[in-house]
Image (cartoon, helix red, strand yellow):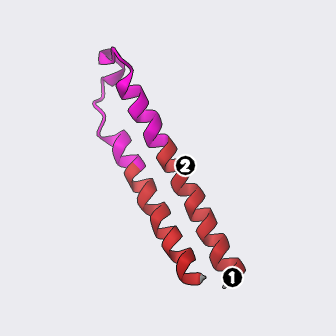
Amino acid sequence: MQILGMIIIVVGIALIIVGKRVAGYLPPDFEEDSDDGFMQMLLSMGKIIMYAGIVFIVAGILFVVIYG
């Protein structure tokens, strides 16, 4: 179960990195040019992916602590 916990932690870290990259690649003036809301949706999806990564990391730590 410790191996499963470590895998979940690595997946969580990867999700956080992807979420930050999504927000980092948006142009600085995306709020002014946004006519259909796609950039806002992309930014919110990046935040959701980051929060999912945090949940995965916490779950992985729990797996390692409880079953380790």
Residue 36 in the image, given as x and y percentages of width and height: 35, 17
Residue drawn 57% across the image and 75% down it: 5
With respect to residue 65, does 55 lie above or below?
above
Between the residue at mark 1 and the residue at mark 2, the CA separation in whole angstroms equals 24 Å
The front one of 67 and 25 is 67
Residue tagged by mark 2?
51
Q: Answer with left or right where residue 26 lies relative to residue 45.
A: left
| Residues rendered magenta in the picture | 19-47
Residue drawn 62% across the image and 71% down it: 61
The front one of 24 and 18 is 18
Residue drawn 40% across the image and 47% down it: 20
Residue 54 in the image, given as x and y percentages of width and height: 56, 56
- Residue 63 is covered by the magenta coloring: no
Residue tagged by mark 1?
67
Q: Answer with left or right where residue 55 lies relative to residue 42.
A: right
Q: Secondary structure at mark 2?
A: helix
Q: Secondary structure at mark 1?
A: helix
Callout 1 environment at 10 Å: few (<14), some (14 to 19), or many (20+)? few
Q: Answer with left or right where residue 44 lies relative to residue 42.
A: right
When asked about the image quadrant of residue 64, the answer is bottom right
When asked about the image quadrant of residue 25, the answer is top left
Q: How many marks?
A: 2
Quick one: quadrant of the C terminus? bottom right
| Amino acid at pointer 2 | Tyr
When asked about the image quadrant of residue 59, the answer is bottom right
Instruction: Say whether disc 1 or disc 2 marks the residue closer to the N-terminus.
Output: 2
- Residue 33 is covered by the magenta coloring: yes
With respect to residue 22, does 44 lie above or below?
above
| Amino acid at pointer 1 | Tyr
Circle nearer the viewer, 1 or 2: 1
Quick one: quadrant of the N terminus? bottom right
Q: Residue furthest bottom?
A: 68
